[in-house]
Amino acid sequence: QVQLVESGGGLVQPGGSLRLSCVASGRLFSILVMGWYRQAPGKERELVARVLSDGTANYADSVKGRFTISRDNAKNTVYLQMDTLKPEDTAVYYCNGIYSSSQPMFGWGQGTQVIVSS
């Protein structure tokens, strides 16, 4: 079973930046589509960005132009660079592998909390 460990969250002021990291166990990381999800209080978990094995990325409209997803297959790590953060970005952020149906592949890690507040 693949284990996912997210890190890098914290408290940041509006307009600030954070970089999240997710390390995945297992030997198949390089061929997986990976994504970052987030869950805000009282809301459903949503997919905000995904990256294909070749580095091609796509984003939810709510984060397009502000977030950048990337991966380092040699380190089994996927990143989420978050710039120009807004209070509505406040959520727990999770990474996961993604099926073609956009459903998550594995059990969830503990996530990393991002709070955007002045």
Image (tube, grey):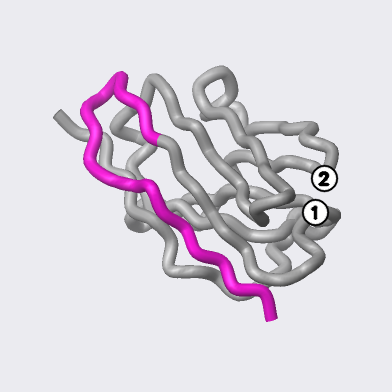
In the rendered image, residue 101, in percent from the top left (x then y), is placed at 82, 56
Q: Residue visible at 78% across and 51% down?
A: 33
Answer left or right for 52 relative to 26: right
Q: Amino acid at mark 1?
A: Ser
Instruction: Tell me the quarter of the image containing the N terminus.
Output: bottom right
In the image, residue 25 sits, relative to residue 68, either above or below, namely: below
In the image, residue 75 sits, relative to residue 68, either above or below, namely: below
Q: Residue visible at 78% across and 68% down?
A: 27
In the rendered image, residue 5, in percent from the top left (x then y), is placed at 50, 64
In the rendered image, residue 51, in percent from the top left (x then y), is placed at 73, 41
Looking at this view, name the residue that lies furthest to the front.
74
Q: Does the rendering let one see residue 43?
A: no
Q: Earlier in the sequence, mark 1 or mark 2?
A: 1
- Within 10 angstroms of label 2, few (less than 14), some, or many (20 or more) residues? some
Q: Secondary structure at mark 1?
A: helix
Looking at this view, name the residue that lies furthest to the left.
118
* Residue topped by disc 2: 53
**Magenta-drawn segment:** 1-18
User: 111 or 72, which lies in front?
Assistant: 72
Q: Amino acid at mark 2?
A: Ser
Q: Are marks 1 and 2 in contact (CB under 8 Å)?
A: yes
Residue 80 falls inside the magenta stretch: no
User: 13 or 3, which lies in front?
Assistant: 3
In the image, residue 95 sits, relative to residue 69, either above or below, namely: below
